[in-house]
Image (cartoon, grey):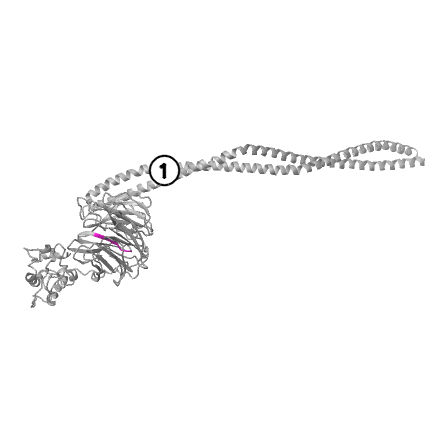
């Protein structure tokens, strides 16, 4: 089958002779090209007979092209099949049988296209400049590139579907961005992009070349490669910018639909596989074929470059799997083991392990040091249709058993997701390894969480027109908005309950801490005041001894002083009487002597009386001091004893309350934990409701803008 057979016998050639141009520098269709067409092309491409739906009889019909697309691209001979097939640059060569057109006539065709493919001398030229494509990378970055991952810019992608069918088609192609929340689903003549975090439809990328059989993101997530075509007719691989949906380059001289394609990590090559049994490698710079690999014995059904860009893995309908050196095309390994069609291949991020799956039901893992098979397991009875490595080395797969599955690196089943209504065809894993997305033969696409197999969204592979989606979006916005108030109320209630539980817990803990602190203080006081009481007792006893010792001395000195006072009083009277007698008888020396003696004795007695009174005062002072000291020591002892008793009473009162206070902490903590635990899901529900509203609002505004009348 030939993909470009629509041109059947395009532009035949003059067997001999030459053409005289009306204007050698400015050829036109009417004067210069039509004579060639009439002589050599009309047989197959006329008003009466139009092979491949191509009519070259008039300028207008030529410009329409055929079922394989346009045949003249003004200004670009290398993208004009009328020239490339005639010059035998592309397949199928025209005429199907015969020699190539003479160089002079090829030069005429080429010059005419280069000059703008004018209809006649009065036509204006409208030369489309050749695209300048330079997306090759000087080096390959391993892992996630720096900066924000590319996402479609708002308003850049088409929001109106190119096709809305009666029902979705089989999911033959699907891929997720390696670094952004984005999934691309192959629809009918369009790629449908969804945000994998929100499930929101992002937009459409048109693919006018036929059925989409393959979608791959570039390793840096900036580009998306879409390949497919029309069976038995034509095949194309088109590279688009993720952010804008702008076409970057289009390659393909295939005469049948491309079944698998990938872009190399350095973005210099695009490899495609098709029913031709060939693997063709195209340059991203000019779209030309770099090399062809002819080892496969049947349709090439799987193509993928390793993440480092060093190797290229390909598989075919006969079960053959090969690994090639990406930049030489030399065979690296032939991997033998599968017994039926290879349906998918997937490289691990380190490029050291390749996963393959097949209609023989198995998934096999191959290491790249020796090309040895390290694991194999029967993954899907009836046939495994798709397998993908995650960034963390796990695998997701789907197949004819309608079940999508998740595996660890050893092939141990981790999860089995709810079955599809029909055969599983394609599987992908999101950039964060959090979600598994798969599609089936009936056009159903589902996304599940990888850790608990919970269904999070169903993605429409046949979206409605914008106007209808706007109505749905408006209803969704209203419904999602209505969810916010109750979820906000639930969150507020949970928050209040958590606050009350916190206050209650803090109060219980504070009470327990206070009881423990008071008990500790009372016990310490008992200990301290017992020590003080024990220290005051001997001091009090010693002071009592001093009081007891001083008391009799006070009595004795008082008695002695009293006695001396009596004697002094008597002696004073006697001494005065003698002195009075001596004064009356001054001539009596004996009286004078007696008077002096009495006066001296009285003076001596007064001295002793003063000493006795001083001793009385000193002993009284000492007794008073001893009594003060005794009183102080007695008070210290009594006070300490009273404090011991008081704190012992406090200890006795607090001790029974310690355990209940401590026991109250655990239930209060449990209540607090329960209240706090309720806050997180309430907050998550509120955040989800808010995010749903925001996403619905964005979708609604986008669709509203898309349907607004253009000014």
Determine the residue positioned at 66% across, 38% down: 535
Q: Which residues are magenta?
A: 213-219
Direction from residue 43 to residue 447 in the image, left or right = right
**Picture layout, residue 699 above or below residue 601:** below
Q: Quadrant of residue 287?
A: bottom left
Q: Which residue is mark 1?
A: 492
Q: Report whether residue 196 is seen.
A: no
Q: Which is more toward the observer, 64 or 274?
A: 274
**Picture layout, residue 360 above or below residue 125:** above
Q: Check the picture and name the quadrant holding the N terminus.
A: bottom left
Label 1: few (<14), some (14–19) or many (≥20) C-alpha neighbours in 10 Å = some
**Circle 1 — which element?**
helix
Q: Which is more toward the observer, 247 or 211?
A: 211
Q: Which is more toward the observer, 138 or 490?
A: 138
Direction from residue 647 to residue 347 in the image, left or right = left
Q: Is residue 215 magenta?
A: yes
Q: Report whether residue 642 is seen.
A: yes
Q: Quadrant of residue 78?
A: bottom left
Direction from residue 256 to residue 378 in the image, left or right = right
Q: Position of residue 98 (x, y in %)?
A: 10, 64
């Amino acid at each position: 089958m030939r993909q470009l057979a629509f041109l059947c016998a395009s532009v035949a050639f003059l067997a001999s002779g030459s053409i005289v141009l009306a204007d050698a520098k400015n050829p036109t269709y009417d004067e210069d090209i039509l004579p060639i067409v009439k002589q050599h092309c009309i047989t197959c491409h006329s008003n009466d007979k139009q092979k491949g739906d191509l009519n070259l009889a008039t300028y207008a019909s030529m410009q329409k092209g055929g079922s394989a697309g346009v045949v003249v691209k003004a200004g670009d001979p290398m993208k004009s099949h009328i020239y490339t097939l005639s010059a035998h640059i592309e397949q199928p060569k025209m005429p199907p049988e015969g020699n190539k057109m003479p160089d002079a006539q090829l030069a005429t065709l080429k010059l005419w296209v280069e000059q703008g493919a004018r209809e006649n001398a009065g036509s204006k030229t409208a030369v489309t400049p050749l695209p300048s494509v330079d997306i090759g990378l000087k080096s390959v970055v391993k892992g996630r590139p720096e900066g924000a991952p590319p996402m479609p810019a708002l308003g850049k992608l088409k929001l109106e579907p190119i096709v809305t069918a009666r029902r979705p088609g089989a999911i033959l192609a699907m891929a997720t961005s390696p670094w952004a929340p984005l999934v691309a689903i192959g629809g009918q003549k369009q790629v449908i992009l969804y945000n994998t975090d929100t499930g929101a439809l992002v937009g459409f990328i048109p693919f006018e070349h036929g059925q989409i059989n393959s979608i791959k993101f570039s390793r840096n997530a900036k580009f998306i490669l879409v390949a497919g075509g029309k069976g038995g007719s034509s095949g194309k691989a088109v590279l688009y910018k993720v952010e804008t949906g702008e076409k970057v380059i289009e390659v393909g001289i295939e005469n049948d639909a491309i079944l698998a394609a990938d872009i190399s990590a350095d973005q210099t090559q695009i490899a495609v596989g098709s029913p031709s049994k060939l693997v063709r490698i195209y340059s991203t710079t000019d779209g030309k074929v770099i090399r062809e690999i002819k080892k496969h014995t049947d349709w090439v059904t799987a193509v993928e470059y390793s993440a480092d860009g060093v190797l290229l893995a390909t598989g075919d309908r006969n079960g053959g799997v090969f690994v090639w050196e990406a930049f030489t095309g030399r065979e690296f390994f032939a991997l033998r083991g599968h017994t039926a069609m290879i349906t998918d291949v997937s490289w691990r991020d380190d490029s050291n392990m390749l996963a393959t799956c097949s209609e023989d039901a198995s998934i096999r893992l191959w290491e790249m040091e020796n090309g040895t098979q390290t694991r194999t397991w029967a993954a899907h009875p009836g046939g495994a249709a798709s397998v993908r490595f995650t960034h963390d080395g796990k695998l997701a797969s789907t197949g004819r058993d309608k079940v999508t599955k998740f595996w660890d690196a050893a092939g141990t089943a981790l999860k089995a997701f709810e079955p599809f209504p029909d055969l599983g065809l394609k599987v992908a894993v999101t950039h964060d390894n959090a979600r598994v997305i798969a599609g089936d033969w009936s056009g159903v696409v589902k996304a599940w969480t990888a850790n608990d197999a919970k269904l999070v969204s169903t993605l429409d592979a046949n979206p409605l027109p914008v106007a209808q989606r706007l109505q749905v979006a408006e209803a969704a916005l209203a419904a999602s908005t209505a969810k916010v108030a109750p979820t906000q109320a639930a969150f507020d209630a949970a928050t209040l309950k958590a606050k009350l539980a916190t206050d209650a817990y803090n109060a219980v803990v504070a009470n327990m801490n206070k009881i423990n602190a008071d008990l500790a203080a009372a016990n310490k006081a008992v200990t301290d005041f017992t020590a003080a009481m024990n220290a005051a007792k001997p001091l009090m006893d010693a002071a009592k001894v001093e009081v007891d010792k001083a008391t009799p001395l006070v009595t004795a000195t008082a008695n002695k002083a009293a006695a001396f006072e009596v004697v002094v009083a008597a002696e004073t009277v006697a001494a005065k009487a003698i002195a009075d007698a001596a004064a009356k008888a001054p001539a009596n020396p004996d009286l004078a002597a007696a008077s002096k003696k009495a006066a001296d004795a009285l003076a001596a007695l007064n001295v002793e009386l003063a000493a006795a009174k001083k001793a009385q005062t000193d002993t009284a002072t000492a007794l008073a001091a001893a009594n003060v000291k005794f009183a102080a020591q007695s008070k210290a002892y009594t006070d300490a004893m009273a404090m011991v008793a008081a704190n012992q009473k406090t200890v006795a009162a607090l001790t029974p309350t310690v355990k209940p206070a401590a026991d109250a902490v655990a239930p209060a903590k449990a209540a607090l934990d329960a209240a706090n635990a309720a806050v997180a899901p309430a907050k998550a529900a509120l955040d989800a409701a808010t995010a749903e509203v925001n996403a619905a609002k964005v979708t609604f505004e986008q669709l509203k803008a898309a349907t607004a009348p253009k000014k």
